[in-house]
Image (cartoon, rainbow, N blue to C red):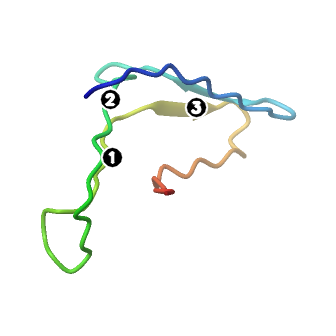
């Protein structure tokens, strides 16, 4: 089956907070499919995350790690 879930991301910043926004070509939607055959040694059976969000920091000292982390 399929299910839809809305999530909220809260970023608590100090000084000038970074802005995460949808820029041209960005996409704020996606999907997740449960995969029971995620073998790191076999090409093509790993879970994947795709998409783009733009990040801008007014004072230039912000950092953004766009590496996804899978949790079970």
Find disc 3 in the rendering and name its residue: 56
Could you say where residue 65 lies in the image, as x and y percent from the top left?
Answer: 55, 52
Quarter in which the N terminus is drawn: top left
CA separation in Å, label 1 and label 2: 8 Å
- The answer to whether the residues at label 3 and label 2 have Cβ atoms under 8 Å apart is no
Q: Earlier in the sequence, mark 1 or mark 2?
A: 2
SS for callout 1: loop
Q: What residue sits right under mark 1 in the picture? A: 49
Q: Is residue 67 above or below residue 58?
A: below
Residue placed farthest to the front in the image? 1
Task: Evaluate if marks 1 and 2 touch, with contact meaning CB atoms under 8 Å apart.
Answer: yes
CA gap between label 1 and label 3 equals 22 Å
The residue that mark 2 highlights is 30
Q: Earlier in the sequence, mark 3 or mark 2?
A: 2
Q: Residues within 10 Å of mark 1 (few under 14, many from 20)?
A: few
7, 16: nearer the viewer: 7
């Amino acid at each position: 089956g399929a299910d839809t879930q809305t999530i909220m991301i809260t970023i608590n910043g100090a000084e000038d907070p970074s802005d995460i926004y949808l820029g041209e070509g960005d996409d704020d939607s996606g999907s997740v499919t449960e995969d029971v055959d995620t073998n790191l040694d076999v090409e093509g059976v790993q879970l994947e995350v795709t998409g783009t969000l733009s990040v801008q920091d007014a004072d230039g000292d912000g950092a953004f790690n766009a590496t996804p982390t899978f949790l079970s």
